[in-house]
Image: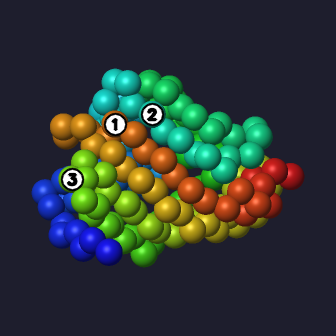
Amino acid sequence: MTSTMPNDNTALAERLFKTHLAMFTSSGMTQADYGSLFTEDAVQEYPYAPAPFSKLLQGRDVIAAYITNVIHSATQWNFTDLTFSATSNPDIVFVEFKGSALVTATGKIYCQIYIGRITLEGEQIKHYREYWNPSWILDAFVA
């Protein structure tokens, strides 16, 4: 087993990711502000996303528009227990966290445990892959 030490990119990934989450919890962040966290050709993946949710988003503008729609589908977004882990590749950082929200359409509480893989390029996110339980999202968001 290889031990990895946090590096400057771990701190950068943590700052960028916390800013990403601020899009959900702060009314002051614009779609353009959010988009600036990502490279122009960035990719977001949600491998376990069931229909009608997207599995793959390509491009900064597409990502920003999609996340804006997600944000407006619920209120009272809350994220806790964030843990960042460095890897042997200084451009890749993992994050584990919990999230919850009140879903507008169903009135249900959404709770989730997430694991994300953040890949950096320069000072931005180039690729983000997020894993979560699809049945929990269906239970809360689909009436």
Question: Compared with residue 53, is residue 1 higher up or lower down, i.e. above or below?
Answer: below
Of helix, strand and loop, which one carries label 2? strand
Residue at the image position 45 percent from the left and 34 percent from the top: 43
Gap between marks 1 and 3 measured at Cα: 13 Å
Please name whichever residue, 28 or 7, is drawn nearer the observer in this view of the structure.
7
Gap between marks 2 and 3 measured at Cα: 19 Å
Q: Is residue 104 left or right of residue 85?
A: right
Q: Disc 2 marks which amino acid? A: Val
Question: Compared with residue 80, is residue 115 higher up or lower down, i.e. above or below?
Answer: above
**Pointer 1 or 3: first along the chain:** 3
Is residue 38 at all visible to an observer of this figure?
A: yes
Answer few, some or many: residues within 10 Å of disc 3's Cα (few below 14, many 20 plus, some between 14 and 19): some
**Dot label at residue 90:** 3
Q: On the image, numbered disc 1 is attached to which residue? A: 126
Residue 38 picture location, percent across and down: 33, 35
Residue at the image position 53 percent from the left and 32 percent from the top: 57
Question: Compared with residue 103, is residue 111 higher up or lower down, i.e. above or below?
Answer: below
- Indicate the quadrant containing the N terminus: top left, top right, bottom left or bottom right: bottom left
Residue 132 picture location, percent across and down: 61, 59
2 and 3 marks in contact (CB < 8 Å): no
**Pointer 2 or 1: first along the chain:** 2
Residue 82 picture location, percent across and down: 39, 70
Q: Disc 1 marks which amino acid? A: Lys
2 and 1 marks in contact (CB < 8 Å): yes
Residue 60 picture location, percent across and down: 40, 28
Please name whichever residue, 97 or 85, is drawn nearer the observer in this view of the structure.
85
Of helix, strand and loop, which one carries label 3? loop
Question: Compared with residue 26, is residue 45 higher up or lower down, i.e. above or below?
Answer: above
**Dot label at residue 43:** 2
